[in-house]
Amino acid sequence: MANIKKLRREPIVIDIGDGVERTLRYTLNSFALIEEKYGTIDKAMEALRSGSVAAVRFALWAGLVHEDENLSEHYVGSQIDLSDLEDLAEKMNKAMMGDLPQDEVVNPN
């Protein structure tokens, strides 16, 4: 039998290159923004998996906009160097998965 337990991980703090530390967090609003842009979350994930730079920029912005509603997607993109994308993708993945429920397997013994 499996129990579902919500796990909160440590916040993912990033500096997009402008010297400001921001918390990368994917809220319900973040996922709604992504869904509005791509139609479905699956299509957004497909775009991210395909390596779309525009998809990475948008998803990164969607994970940061909770701290500053005036933060623009274009500004976020202007601060990122292509050499930073691999590290950012790893942090985005960790932040996206951080607040999702995880199955906890209970040992029957």
Image: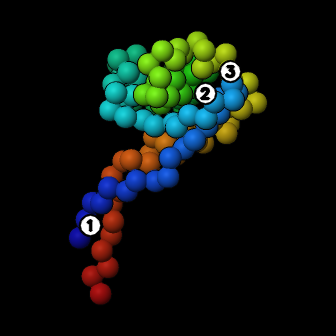
The N terminus - image quarter? bottom left
Query: As drawn, which residue projects farthest toward the right?
Result: 83
Q: Are marks 1 and 3 in contact (CB under 8 Å)?
A: no
Residue 18: percent from the left, percent from the top? Answer: 69, 25
Residue appearing at x 61%, y 35% in the figure: 21
Judged left or right of residue 100, residue 74 is right
> Who comes first in sequence, dot 1 or dot 3?
1
Disc 3 element: helix
Checking the image for residue 51, the label placed there is: 2
Query: What colour scheme has been applied to the protein in the rendered image?
Result: rainbow
Q: Is residue 47 visible?
A: no
The C terminus - image quarter? bottom left
> Who comes first in sequence, dot 1 or dot 2?
1
Of residue 13 and residue 30, the one placed in the foreground of this image is 13
Say what amino acid the circle numbered 1 marks.
Ala
Checking the image for residue 79, the label placed there is: 3
Residue appearing at x 36%, y 47% in the figure: 100
> Who comes first in sequence, dot 2 or dot 3?
2
Judged left or right of residue 10, residue 3 is left
Of residue 104 and residue 6, the one placed in the foreground of this image is 6
Say what amino acid the circle numbered 2 marks.
Gly
The residue to which callout 1 is attached is 2
Circle 1 or circle 3, nearest the eye: 3
